[in-house]
Image (cartoon, rainbow, N blue to C red):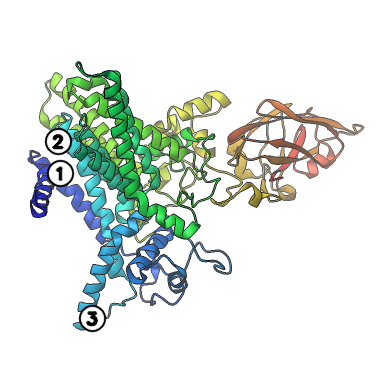
Amino acid sequence: MSRPGRLRRGLAWLTGLGRGLGWARALVAAGFLTIALMYTCNQDMGGDPDAPRGDGIYRPVLARGDGHLSFIMARSLAFDGDLDFRNDLRRFGDPFGPPGGWVERPTIPHPIGPPLVWVPLLWTAQGGAVVANALGAEVQLHGYTLWHQRLAFSTSALAAMIAVGLGLALARRLGGRRWSSSYAAVAILLGTSLTYYATFMPSYSHALDAAGAAGFLYAWAVTLGRWDRRRVFLVGGLLGVAALMRTQELALGVVVALEIAVAAARPPAGVAPWRYRARLVATGAAMAGVALVVLFPQALVWNDLYGSFTSLPQGESYTRPGYPMILELLFASRNGWFSTHPLAYAGALGLIVLAVRGPRVHAQARLIALGLLAALVVQVYLNAIIIDWWAQASFGQRRLCSMTLPLVVGLAAWLEVGVAVVRQRRAGRVLGHAAAVVGLGWFVWWNLTAVWPLHGGRPAMFVAGPCCPRVSGPLRDVGVAVYRRVGNPFAFPANALFALRHGVGLDRWDRVVGDYPWVPPLDYTPASLRGQSERWRIGSGRKDPFMVRGFGPGLSVRGGVRWTVAREATALVPNLIPEPLEVALWVKPNLPRGVMTKTVRVRWNGRVVAEKAVTGETELTWRIRGDVGLSRLEVEAPIDPASDDARAWGATGPVGVALGELRFTAP
């Protein structure tokens, strides 16, 4: 087929994605229009629209933080034809550069895929600026302008629409009705992290990542069972494109591995089984080879910047495969995927529903659902082993925007169950639509009310704590009422397991998980931490949520102390670093008149790590390794009436020992 013919066929396929939706098209169009309007309403300019850009000071336009650095990569490629960022960072600023500036050639660790997408648009914008200037406009031609960035970052809004559109198309292919699939697509578009990264923070690559992953997963699903050459190039090529947007998307290839395993277990009759299986493995290897060829530009960039084709730019300690923080990533109040965006929770569980229903809805539904589940599980694991599993200043789990298509398919599966229930009860269509609008609309509106205050490029700086303060009005009032009774219901089962283990309330999970005393630089190494220390002030009143039992309130006396008020007192201590650490606990005994010493026993996760008869202020030390997450600190000491000295340190009744600070030191 000629190129024009292929182009016409491709355009016809794109325009045909919405065929058969009927009036549901209006719903999808309204969702897309909402994203477009939110994107065009995002007037950032860093709060300083009049100051000229390019004078060496970091002044955001639409690009911020990591997005600024990604745009610098695109600008350097488009305008300089290289990846030497010295002139770009000197001119437009570097918010994350080393103190005193770069001594060596600066590096940027972000993937090359998004800059490659933006380069043609920057060339287009530059041409438009030249023409506009000839007609009297005054657009600066250095490329760091609102005009250039508005055009380049429109790809994020478009990519979000593509991602949910492909999810809608796949849901329809798997037997989903037009309304259920459309409701699911719009709900995921407007009710998850994707909303923010498609509109108010479009310089980040997450919407493009969503589209790249969706393109691969859709192509895999609709060509399932084919092992011809065209499929090898299509599926392998799209896997490479997805990996260009974010390298870890190579792991999406797990869906191909699952397909091969299932096919190999049931070779067709009349074919030599081992020859058939060898062909399957060879085809899978060919797909992987095509993906690596497409990904090769990323390897070239790594080699140019870091001197290695297989570099991990963030450093060796950025990922910790042996310490996945899965429950935290999914259910923590600090950017937990399910707890902050319940529609993602529903979409993920919906894939299980689709797998169970399987052949009743489509001949390949079960295998596709299991493949999407496998992709989701792998992505959760890969993100859970990253040291900052909460993704720093993130609106929800931004790194899991790649799972947009599976969420649409899964949510549509739930809505199909709802359709069956409505029909079984012989309820009218109006009731079904009302239930969908109210049920999904609640979470969409909750998300939008949390997103809107962040327009103008404001970063999402959420910390551990109740989710209700992020929204206002009636939504908040209802949310607070529910939270007071059961905590965040979308943190279940993590919050329930936590409450049962430690004997605390359901809301305690939200208040303590995600708050760490020591968050090292993402590129840290054990050698770079050696000799450094960080203090966790157990005596501070802010640490009250970490106290389980047997402790009094935090006191501001002498820098902050906390007395034990029971013979055995238990606290939870957070830690993010798996490497060996030395822990030192400051203690001061309450010694009644005539008593010279008090024996203090300390347990760490049930193991006795220190036991000493103390006579005054002292430090008890021990070493830990691999204790990532929350550890139990138990302090055992006799309780006596408060001495005059103890009263001077804030004691008001019988107490045991005062605890001050817990110091972590890298040996």
Q: Secondary structure at mark 2?
A: helix
* Residue at image location 34% in from the left, 75% down from the top: 142
Precedes in sequence: disc 2 or disc 3: 3
Three-letter residue code for mark 3: Asn
Residue 311: image tag: none
Query: In this image, 628 relative to 258: left or right?
Result: right
Name the residue beneath numbered marker 2: 179
Name the residue beneath numbered marker 1: 27
Name the residue beneath numbered marker 3: 133
Query: In this image, 634 relative to 136: left or right?
Result: right
Mark 1 or 3: in front is 3
Mark 2 or 3: in front is 3
Coordinates of residue 253 in the picture (x, y in percent): 34, 36
From mark 1 to mark 3, how far is it between C-alphas? 40 Å
Residues packed near mark 3 inside 10 Å, few (<14), some (14 to 19) or many (20 plus):
some
Residues packed near mark 2 inside 10 Å, few (<14), some (14 to 19) or many (20 plus):
many
Q: Secondary structure at mark 3?
A: helix
User: Can you say whether 291 is above or below 56 in the image?
Assistant: above
Three-letter residue code for mark 2: Trp
Comparing 72 with 546, the one in front is 72
Comparing 50 with 376, the one in front is 376
Precedes in sequence: disc 2 or disc 1: 1
User: Can you say whether 324 is above or below 88 in the image?
Assistant: above
Residues at discs 2 and 1 in contact (Cβ within 8 Å): yes
From mark 2 to mark 3, how far is it between C-alphas? 48 Å
From mark 2 to mark 1, how far is it between C-alphas? 9 Å
